[in-house]
Amino acid sequence: MDIEERMRLIKEVGEEIITEQELKELLQTKTHPIAYDGFEPSGRMHIAQGLLRTINVNKMIKAGIRFKMLIADWFALMNNKLGGDMKKIRTTGKYYIEIWKACGMKTEKIDFVWSNDLVRDEEHWKTTIDVARHSTVKRIVRCSQIMGRKETETLSAAQIIYPCMQVADIFHLKADITQLGTDQRKVNVLAREIGPKLGYWKPVIVSHHMILGLGKPVSTSKDRDDMILDLKMSKSKPDSAIFMLDSELEIKRKIGKAYCPERIIEMNPVMEYMKYIIFEKFGSVRIERTEKFGGDITINSYDELCEIYKQGKLHPLDLKNAVAFYLNEMLKPIRKRFEHGGAKKLCEEVKSYSITR
């Protein structure tokens, strides 16, 4: 695969890339650059973490990128997820990996690294402290969105350490690329600024899109990253998200009540599901309708869907029914995998945990 094709695949993942020129130079000098992604094991997994992440990671791997996935157990502890119970946090981390396997993520080509192993390295802690020494408290607080927090929230002392550790992780994982959501932009920019001061490098940032929650998008925040927090899918708001093991009826119910204004494409979560997940998987979709409303229709691209929807030729209810159908088709084999054996036991244990924020 030539450089241009690799760039094309990565640009499909990156809603924002800092910078494209640096990415191109990286691909020209390294056959298999290392990309880092990380996640807090914090409860049931929703489809942005499951289906969308699988799509993005597999594209990056296809482009020749080697992935290191950080199971951020210590970060979940610092962020008070699952009540700070490390046993629950680590069980949830194992559950996430099992779901990704069921999704078809190319886990055999991914190095899974636990934070617990990284922090045993004295040099990692030195880098964490060096990041803190070269940063002001104000600058670190500005990175609070990476934890799902806003700058205006009261942070614990542990949450002040969090961004410093995340920057240290990037360098100790030897990551050439940070491949996380747009909500992680500020800490990734900090890593680019501070890396050369500590004798490291400037990692390329490939930030993927954050899927909207299912409710009406409302945000009073002026800060771009705070706005993302207000609008994104969140497990702390169960009806704003489709979870990977939701039942068929539950998915139909949630999609049925989702915000989906007629003729409007922008800030429409149901259209986002079509763009970022369903068309990525199926390429084309068939929407069933009664003859009274035009009969069944096959749509071969997201752009074609946008034109039809903007013209009012497709009713929101028909769109919702199609989204619910295709999501259920994607999630059927995953639900099946968790119906028996160790996977079922793992799922039941995680479902019993109370979500804490």
Image (spheres, grey):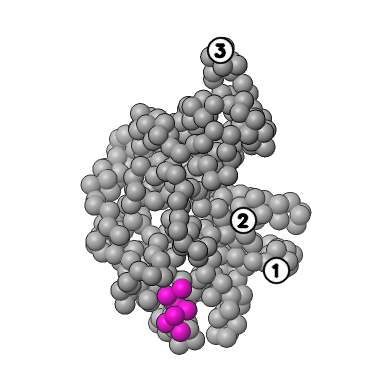
Q: Looking at the picture, which amino acid does disc 1 mark?
A: Glu
Disc number for residue 14: 2
Other-residue count near label 2 (Cα within 10 Å), few / some / many at <14 / 14–19 / ≥20: many
Of circles 2 and 3, the one toward us is 3
Residue 312 position within the rendered picture, expressed as x and y whole percent measured from the top left: 61, 28
CA distance for labels 3 and 1: 54 Å
Residue 221 position within the rendered picture, expressed as x and y whole percent measured from the top left: 46, 61
Disc number for residue 22: 1
Inspect this view and state whether residue 353 appears: yes
Q: How many marks?
A: 3
Q: Nearer the viewer, residue 257 or 339?
A: 257
Q: Looking at the picture, which amino acid does disc 2 mark?
A: Gly
Disc number for residue 324: none
Q: Looking at the picture, which amino acid does disc 3 mark?
A: Lys
Tell me, yes or no, whether the highlighted magenta stretch contains residue 141.
yes
Other-residue count near label 3 (Cα within 10 Å), few / some / many at <14 / 14–19 / ≥20: few
> For residue 85, what is the image quadrant?
bottom left
Q: Which residue is mark 3?
A: 292
Query: Which residues fall within the magenta stretch?
Result: 136-142
CA distance for labels 2 and 1: 14 Å
Residue at 62% x, 56% y: name it.
14
> For residue 33, what is the image quadrant?
bottom right
Q: Nearer the viewer, residue 264 or 186?
A: 264
Tell me, yes or no, whether the highlighted magenta stretch contains residue 32.
no
Image quadrant occupied by the C terminus: bottom left
Chain-order first, disc 3 or disc 1: 1
In the picture as drawn, the residue positioned furthest to the top comes out as: 291
Residue at 70% x, 68% y: name it.
22
Residue 244 position within the rendered picture, expressed as x and y whole percent measured from the top left: 40, 41
